[in-house]
Image: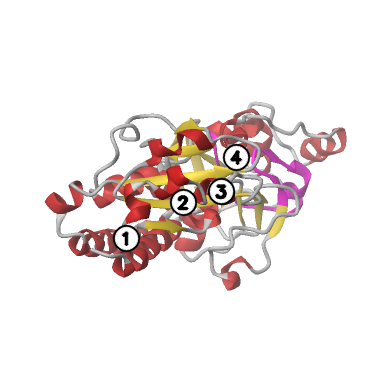
Amino acid sequence: MPRSLTRRLTVATATTAFAVTLTACGGSDDGSTGAGPAGGLGAGAPTHTVSTVMGDVKVKNAPKRVVVLDTDALDSAVSLGVTPVGATTVVDKAPFSTYLPADKLKGIKPVGEIGTPNLEAIAQLKPDLILSSKVRDEKNYPSLSKIAPTVFTDTTGPTWRKNFDLHADALGKKNEAKKVVADYDAHLNRLTTALGGPPAAKKITFGFVRFVEGADTRLYLNDTFVGSIFKDLQVGRPANQNTTGFSLDISPEQIDKADANVIFYSAYGDPEKAKETTTTAGPLWKGLDAVKKGRAFKVDDNTWMLGIGYTGAGKVLDEMEKDYASAPH
């Protein structure tokens, strides 16, 4: 997704009609997560307390009507066998994350866009748990908390493993989470072994290039979802990309800065408008080490950019495994 979406904190304001609905449902003005409309905690429901960036939140032990407001929370829910009743999308009328199994997304209602959720639509679903993050929805927290217990992580991206643990706690799926984590770690070990083991893997530099319609080309750094997977895999990184931060933005004339032993690349938007087509046909691209040796692989942008969770990470590892196995050595 574009950096403007990744960075923005823009949020929707509740309408007057929605405010009246909340008042009628007895929502308090202090942002507490006690009982919201219909979904809420419910009288006598077994609960547990979850520690969040916004404070302690009391949630049902086994919430049944979950609304997720970002792609990482959607991935967490699906990875743990939970189909949410509602979820936000990247842009209006966009599908939910297409890398996730279609049958696990069946019946989910759209509730606005990431960062600007439709509060009325959320309330109508009568959720008993809402998952999002402070970076996306801090200004919406008081209103969301009146609807149902609301659990926020601090941010998204490279903290996805920590965020998953919080989501699992809130969903009452901590035992199921252990298997998800163990499966991912086993997948990592399998691929690292295929690279020759940790010492050998460290000597192979991996890079990720994203061609973006309407923006500069991005070389992804360590403080990203992709960067965190490279770290988990114990591979090396090009010196100019082995640093903190989100991305190194370059022009087509600077594509030589993408040089690495192995390059994965994707395009957001139209490949021609994103300058992927002209750049990859040019002499600078063709002169990159990975390209000359047949180790530059085009990958699915939706999976690598939106799959911020264990199912998405597993798909990324699958693609790396397949591509590297087919590459000249």
Dot 3 alpha-carbon crowd within 10 angstroms: few under 14, some 14 to 19, many 20 or more: many
Judge the density around disc 1: few (<14), some (14-19), many (≥20) Cα neighbours within 10 Å.
some
Residue type (three-letter) at the residue carrying disc 1:
Tyr
Q: Residue furthest right?
A: 17
Which residue is tagged 1? 184
Residue at screen point 65% across, 31% down: 142
Task: Look at the image and say whether residue 144 sits in the magenta stretch.
Answer: no
Residue 83 left/right relative to 180: right
Secondary-structure class at tag 3: helix
Mark 1 and mark 3: Cα distance apart in space: 31 Å
Which mark is on residue 261? Answer: none
Q: Distance of mark 1 from mark 2, alpha carbons?
A: 23 Å
Give residue 2's mark. 4
Instruction: Give the CA distance from mark 1 to mark 4.
Output: 27 Å
Tell me which numbered mark, 2 or 4, is placed earlier along the sequence.
4
Which residues are the magenta region? 111-134
Measured as percent of width and height from the top left, residue 167 is found at: 46, 49
List the residue tagged with mark 3. Answer: 276
The N terminus - image quarter: top right
Position of residue 52 relative to residue 124, above or below, is above
Residue 47 in view of the camera: no
Q: Amino acid at mark 3?
A: Glu
Query: Would you say the residues marked 1 and 4 are in contact, meaning their CB atoms lie under 8 Å apart?
Result: no
Q: Earlier in the sequence, mark 1 or mark 2?
A: 1
User: Residue 44: percent from the left, percent from the top?
Assistant: 56, 53
Q: Residue furthest bottom?
A: 103
Residue drawn at (61%, 45%), measured in percent from left and top? Answer: 274
Furthest toward the left, the residue is: 199
The residue mark sitting in front, 1 or 3, is 3
Q: Which residue is mark 2?
A: 265
- Label 4's element? loop
Quote the CA–CA distance across marks 2 and 4. Answer: 15 Å
